[in-house]
Amino acid sequence: MNDVTPDPWHGLRSLTAARVALGRTGASLPTREVLKFGAAHALARDAVHLPLDAAALCGQLDAAGWPSVRVHSAAPDRATYLLRPDLGRRLDEASAAALATDGAPPDLVFVAADGLSSLATSRHVVPLLQAVRALAPAAWRIGPVVVAEQARVALGDPVGERLRARLVAVLIGERPGLSSPDSLGIYLTWDPRTGRHDAERNCISNVRPEGLPYPDAARRLVWLCNEALRLRLTGVNLKDLSHLALSGG
């Protein structure tokens, strides 16, 4: 006997991963939905605390033809990172020294950062970069991928500053949600340097197969990079009109 009362919105469940049309048993939720909620909460919590396997990610990048370098923020461990966001925005001394370069300044540097979900970084960075490579102009000088541990978005500013990059794109694990423990965010900044504000960045969020697919995210990012290099700015003054360009509008 099935005591679960059917929900008239049940057909909407095929359109979203959100918790809609869960049904009910009396005045409560069905046991299976309560258990699913607990499991999703555990996945989100684990995503925050799971350390990034930086060596494995560097190996994947190398196999895909992307040279990489590892850095660490000034936050020595995860507990400090969560309690002191300011330390996650700064490089530790060894990393700052390792990024000193005398080579030609790159047009673009990617920072692969763990952020609040190392799952997102380990799963999505390499396929996203492969999609970007297929679309990026051959004339772009792209620096090594900087794999950053215990990193916040703004860590890209001192990284780009040390490498003298014109643009930095931080690929970072977003705060996990109950239906998305592995969303990747992209934060693009022109002329990165310490002290930049969030209003000076462009953001592309929820990059993952169940959200914004890699090809679509890559097209938006390449379009924004082209415009940033042309206009010499990012942030609120650079409107994302990539959908018009892609549709011919």
Image (cartoon, rainbow, N blue to C red):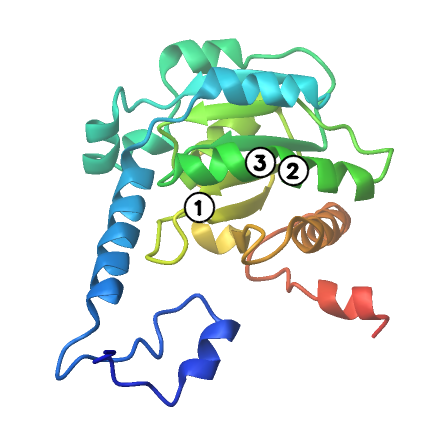
* Quadrant containing the N terminus in the rendered view: bottom left
Q: Quadrant of residue 244?
A: bottom right
> What amino acid type should be assigned to the residue bearing mark 2?
Pro
Residue sitting nearer the eye, 129 or 137:
129
Q: Residue 194: percent from the left, percent from the top?
A: 45, 34
Q: Residue 17: percent from the left, percent from the top?
A: 44, 65
Q: Which residue is mark 3?
A: 125
* Proximity of marks 3 and 1: CB atoms separated by less than 8 Å: no
Q: Residue 173: percent from the left, percent from the top?
A: 44, 42
Question: From where the camera sits, is residue 193 visible?
Answer: no
Q: Would you say 40 lies left or right of 192 here?
A: left
> What amino acid type should be assigned to the residue bearing mark 1?
Asp
Name of the residue lying farthest toward the bottom: 8
Residue ID at (74%, 18%): 104
Q: Would you say 158 lies left or right of 136 here?
A: left
Question: From where the camera sits, is residue 187 visible?
Answer: yes
Q: Quadrant of residue 94?
A: top left
* Quadrant containing the C terminus in the rendered view: bottom right
Q: Which residue is mark 1?
A: 182
Q: Residues within 10 Å of mark 3 (few under 14, many from 20)?
A: many
> What amino acid type should be assigned to the residue bearing mark 3?
Val
Query: Marks 1 and 2, how far apart in space?
Result: 14 Å
Give the mark count: 3
Secondary structure at numbered mark 1: loop
Q: Would you say 248 lies left or right of 22 here?
A: right
